[in-house]
Amino acid sequence: MNIELIKQKSGIVGESEEINQVLEMVSQVAGVDISVLINGESGTGKELVAKAIHTASMRSSKDLIIVNCGAIPEGIIESELFGHKKGAYTDASESRKGYFETANKGTIFLDEIGDMPLETQVKVLRVLETGEYMRVGDSISKKTDTRVIAATNKDLAKLVKEGKFRQDLYYRLKTVTINLPALRHRKNDIRLLVERFALQFSRTNKIKYKGFTPEAIKVIQKFDWPGNVRELRNFIESILILEKGERITAEIIEKQLQNEKMMEFSDNPALPVVVNQNPDQAERELILRQLLFLRQDIEELKLMLKQSDFSILNSPRNIDENFSNKIHDNEFGDFEDKTLLKEQAIGSFKTTDLEKEMILRTLEYFNNNRRAAAKSLGMSERTLYRKINDYGIEKKINKDN
Ligand SMILES: Nc1ncnc2c1ncn2[C@@H]1O[C@H](COP(=O)(O)OP(=O)(O)OP(=O)(O)O)[C@@H](O)[C@H]1O
Ligand SMILES: [Mg+2]
C-alpha cells in the first residue's frame, strides 16, 4: 500500500518529511509478519500507527485487539492475555479465552508494554518466538498465529538497565522500531492537522466554521505542544466551542494559549487542567476540586479512626476540643454505621459521586485516554482502571461512543 492510501485509510494527517518517513516504514512492514515496536511521546499517534499497520496488512479482515498493559491489574494480566482454565482460580467457574486466542490470524496491539510485569514478559517472548502459550492453570500448550505490535513512551533500554524490562524481549521487539516524532519536531504538519480537526469537529457538532487566519496558524506553530497531537486536537476543539462561528484570529489563539500556559504552571499540576471555560464553569470546577480534597481528608480521618478502633471516642480529652465537640454534636454523621460525612453537608452529591464525576470529566477531557487521565487525577492507571469498573463508568463511555 502506498503512503497516500495509508494516510487516507488511517486518517493519519501530515506532509512533513518526518511523518512521511514513518508512513514509508508502515508501508514496508505492514505486509511482513514481523513484530513492530512503536516508540513516541504521549499523544504522537502510536495507536493510530498501530491501526494503520493492521489495516495495511494481510490481516486486515481479522481482528485488531488493543491491550493497554499498564491499565490491567498485575494479578489478572496473564489470564487476560492467555486465558485461563476452569478452576484456575477459586472464582474461575468457566474456562476463558485470552486475547492471544481471540486475535488468532489477526493482530494484537500491546500498548504501554513498558508497564508489563516481568513474569508476563517471559510468556510474551515465548509467543513471539514460537507462537505458543498456555492458559493460566493449564499444562497444555496452545498455538496462535498473531502479529504483535507493541508501543511505549518509555525508554525501554533504560528500563532494561534498571532491571524492569527483560533484555531478551527488548532485543526481540526492537528489530523493527518506528519512532514517532514529537509534534514540535514536525511543525509544518500543524496547518493540516488544525484544518482536519476543525473540519471534523465542526461537522460532527454542527458548529459554523469560518477557518483560521494564516497568522493564527503561525501562532499555533510557535507553541511547543508538549501533549503533542492530542493536545493540539483538544485545543482546536475548545477554541471552536468558545468562538462559535467566528473566524479564528491570532489574538484569539494567543489569549487561549496564555490560559493554557497559566494552567500548566498552576500550583496543582496533579489536577485536571480545564482550559477555556467561562468564570461560572471555572468556579464550579474549583468547588468540585475542593470537595474532592475534603473527601480525601475524610477518607484519611476514617482510616485513622478505624485504626484506633474508635478509641478516641472514649477519650475525647486526647483530641482537639473542636473535633471532639463535632463528634458529640454528630456533625460528622453517624458513627454507628461508620459514615463520617453527612450527605447534607455537600448537597445532593455523595462523595463517591464527586469522584465519579471527576473521573468522567477527566476521561472526557483526555478523550478517554486513561493514562493521561490517571496522571492528571494523581492516581495510578491501575487504580483508575479499578475505579472505572467500580463506578460502572466503562458502560457509559462505550454507550456514548
Ligand atoms: N498524524 C496524525 N493525524 C491525525 N490525527 C492524529 C495524528 N497523530 C495523532 N492523532 C490523534 O491524536 C490523538 C492521540 O493519538 P494516539 O492515541 O494514537 O496517541 P498515542 O501516541 O497512542 O498517545 P498515548 O501515549 O498518550 O496513548 C488521537 O485522537 C489521534 O487520532
Ligand atoms: Mg496510546
Image (cartoon, helix red, strand yellow):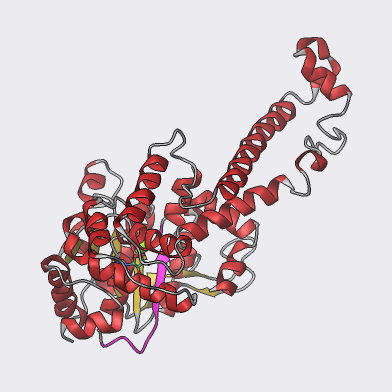
> In this rendering, would 197 be left or right of 219?
right
Report the residue at 26% width, 88% height from top: 58
> In this rendering, would 260 be left or right of 331?
left
Residue 10 shows up from this direction: yes
Above or below, 302 relative to 214: above
Residue 262 picture quarter: top left
Q: Nearer the viewer, residue 183 or 398?
A: 183
Residue 324 picture quarter: top right
Residue 174 picture quarter: bottom left
Q: Nearer the viewer, residue 331 or 119?
A: 331
Q: Nearer the viewer, residue 194 or 355?
A: 194
Above or below, 213 relative to 4: above
> In this rendering, would 293 be left or right of 374?
right
**Segment colored magenta:** 58-69
Residue 112 shows up from this direction: no
Q: Quadrant of the N terminus?
A: bottom left
> Which image quadrant shows ligand 1?
bottom left
Report the residue at 54% width, 71% height from top: 85
Report the residue at 56% width, 46% height from top: 279
Residue 268 location (% of width, % of height): 47, 36
Q: Nearer the viewer, residue 109 or 210?
A: 210
Report the residue at 29% width, 65% height from top: 46
